[in-house]
Each structure stands twice: as structure tokens, then as C-alpha cells.
Image (spheres, rainbow, N blue to C red):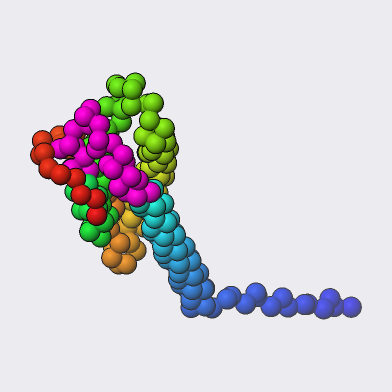
């Protein structure tokens, strides 16, 4: 009895055009996912910088609010130079009149240098420490300066993270498209900030 021959149908090949289409779709999905992820990362980093800067400004404002009491309390002591007290008052007014981060940082640096002179004077004259009001203000000022120092560190960390995203490849492509630019980290002092002009005027606190 003759054997029955069974024909095996050849496997159907998947159309090449569908393979190419699938690859293109996959690549597009990967690019879209990367774009969305990078976009969100840039926005998150930028919002974090804004939040941390708000913390810096809060502590700056705390320092500025101490100045009227500090000046009014210390101006009666001959150890405190009137020129320095005047400069502190002027810088306080300048700080309140500024609006940009760069301007406020510059004024705050000069204010810090002038306040440092007040603190050193206080430390060098033990008789000043007998005044409980002055001592209380100095303690408040010292605590505020410590908070500012911590806030600056946090701000610089946030700026560093943001700048890394903005300037490094390939995320810098999306950052450029979004118009996001590098931010300037906080510098401790500005050149010449430690030099308070020797102006001798009556101190008026606004």
C-alpha cells in the first residue's frame, strides 16, 4: 500500500513592513517617555530651587526685622561706630527695595559683613554683655545667622542639582527648548563687602 505523502506548509513570514513599523513605534514611545521624564525632572528641580530660595529669603527677612531693634539698642554705646550702624540701616532699606535674587544676595552679603562688625564689637567688650536686651538681640542674631548658613547650603545643593540637569547631555537639549538656563550658586561674600564706609550720620530706622 503506497504511503501517503503529507505536505508541510512553509511558515508564513511576518510582513517586513509591520516589523519596521513596530520598531519605529517602539523608538517613538521610548523617546516620548524620555522627554516626559526629563521635562518633569527639570520642572521638579526648578521648583525645588524656588522653594529653597524662599527659605533663604525667610531667614533674610528675619535678620532684617532684627535690625531696627538692634540699631536702637546699640547706638547709645560708644563702642559701636555710628558709621557702621548707619550702613546697616541703609542696607536694610536697600534689601527691602530689591526684587531679584541676584540683587538681594549682593545686598545681603554686604549686610552680613556689617553685622559681623557689630558682633565682633559685642564679643570684645564684656561690659556690653551686662545689658540683657543687647545680649538677647545678639543671641537672636546669632541664631538667625546659623539658619541663613544652613539655608544657603541647601540652596546651593538645589542649584547644583538643577544645573547638572540643565547643562549635561542629553537633558540640556530639552532644557534649552524650555528656555531654562543655569542658575548662579550662592557666594559667601561679595568683593569689598567687608569694608563699611566711615560715614557719621544720625541713625534713622525706617
Q: Is residue 52 magenta?
A: no
Q: Position of residue 193 (x, y in %)?
A: 18, 38
Query: Quarter of the image containing the N terminus?
Result: bottom right
> What residue occupies the far right of the structure in this picture?
1
Residue 8 to residue 136: above or below: below
Q: Is residue 128 left or right of residue 92?
A: right
Q: Kindly indicate the quadrant of the structure image that contains residue 203.
A: top left
Q: Is residue 22 left or right of residue 93?
A: right
Q: Can residue 68 be found in the magenta stretch?
A: yes
Instruction: Report the number of discs.
Output: 0
Instruction: Kindly tell me whether residue 173 is visible in this rendering.
Output: no
Residue 65 in the figure: left or right of residue 199 = right
Pinpoint residue 20: horizontal percent, then vertical percent: 47, 73
Residue 132 is situated, as x and y percent measured from the top left of the image, at: 41, 32
Identify the image quadrant of residue 146.
top left
Image quadrant containing the C terminus: bottom left
In the image, what residue occupies the spot 25% across and 60% down?
99
Residue 197: percent from left, percent from top: 11, 37
Picture residue at 30% right of the left edge, 62% below the top: 180
Q: Nearer the viewer, residue 58 or 130?
A: 130
The image shows residue 77, relative to residue 27, as above or below, that is: above
Viewer-nearest residue: 76 or 99: 76
Please provide the residue range marked out in magenta.
62-88
- At x 65%, y 74%, the residue is 11
Nearer to us in this view, 71 or 196: 71
- In which quadrant of the rendered view does residue 130 lie? top left
Q: Examine the rendering and report whether any part of residue 55 can be seen.
A: yes
- Could you tell whether 142 is left or right of 119 in the image? right
Q: Magenta part mainly helix, strand or loop?
A: helix
Residue under the point 33% across and 26% down: 128
Amino acid at each position: 500500500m503506497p504511503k501517503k505523502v503529507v505536505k508541510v506548509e512553509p511558515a508564513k513570514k511576518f510582513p517586513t513592513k509591520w516589523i519596521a513599523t513596530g520598531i519605529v513605534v517602539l523608538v517613538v514611545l521610548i523617546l516620548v517617555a524620555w522627554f516626559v521624564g526629563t521635562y518633569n525632572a527639570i520642572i521638579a528641580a526648578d521648583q525645588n530651587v524656588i522653594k529653597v530660595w524662599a527659605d533663604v529669603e525667610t531667614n533674610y527677612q528675619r535678620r532684617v526685622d532684627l535690625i531696627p531693634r538692634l540699631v536702637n539698642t546699640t547706638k547709645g554705646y560708644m563702642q559701636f561706630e555710628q558709621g557702621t550702624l548707619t550702613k546697616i540701616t541703609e542696607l536694610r532699606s536697600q534689601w527691602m527695595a530689591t526684587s531679584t535674587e541676584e540683587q538681594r544676595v549682593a545686598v545681603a552679603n554686604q549686610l552680613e559683613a556689617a553685622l559681623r562688625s557689630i558682633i565682633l564689637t559685642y564679643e570684645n567688650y564684656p561690659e556690653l554683655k551686662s545689658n540683657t536686651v543687647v545680649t538677647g538681640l545678639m543671641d537672636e542674631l546669632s541664631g538667625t545667622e546659623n539658619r541663613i548658613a544652613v539655608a544657603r547650603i541647601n540652596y546651593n545643593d538645589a542649584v547644583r542639582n538643577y544645573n547638572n540637569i540643565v547643562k549635561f547631555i542629553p537633558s540640556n537639549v530639552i532644557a534649552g527648548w524650555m528656555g531654562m538656563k543655569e542658575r548662579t550658586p550662592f557666594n559667601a561674600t561679595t568683593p569689598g563687602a567687608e569694608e563699611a564706609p566711615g560715614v557719621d550720620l544720625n541713625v534713622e530706622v525706617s
